[in-house]
Image: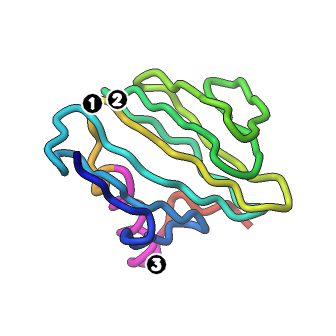
Amino acid sequence: MLVRRLSDVAAIEVHGLRPHVLMDAGELGSRNLSVNWLEVPAGVSEELRSHEEAEQVYVVVSGSGTMSATGDTQRLAVGDLVLIPPATDHAVENDGAQPLALVSVQSPAVSADELFSRRLAAQASGYDEYEDDE
């Protein structure tokens, strides 16, 4: 048995979201899964995104918010599970007053580079196609 503690994993700052990569693709001997802890502060939303090959499951561990996928938006609360099929645009939003935390599992595994590097690169360069028009 292998254990990785959330307290040992650094958060990545991406557009107000705080993902923690608990198990990246190929880590800890896993061949088929990647796992992230995602913190969404109050008032923050994620832009629509998809993963061409991977199914994705989110489980709400604290707070509440909404998840949108293929034009459908659902309210989420602690204990709720959301299944996102491959190649499905989806986004999470914390429209509440408390932080929202979710565990996200992808299969087959999706590397953190694939999940976050494009956004981080855009953020670092000062050009951000994900930024809302103001």
Q: Tell me the residue that label 2 is attached to.
A: 54
Residue drawn at x 14%, y 44% is 29
Q: Position of residue 122 (x, y in %)?
A: 41, 68
Whether the residues at callouts 1 and 2 have beta carbons within 8 Å, the answer is: yes
In the figure, 47 relative to 118: above or below?
Answer: above
Query: In front here: 96 or 14?
Result: 96
Q: Position of residue 103 (x, y in %)?
A: 51, 45
Choose the circle earlier in sequence order: 3 or 2. 2
Q: Tell me the residue that label 1 is attached to.
A: 108
Going by the picture, which residue comes out furthest to the right?
97
Residue drawn at x 76%, y 29% is 74
Q: Tell me the residue that label 3 is attached to.
A: 126
Q: Is residue 78 left or right of residue 61?
A: right
In the figure, 49 relative to 39: above or below?
Answer: above
Amino acid at dot 1: Pro
Q: Position of residue 79 (x, y in %)?
A: 67, 35
Amino acid at dot 3: Gly
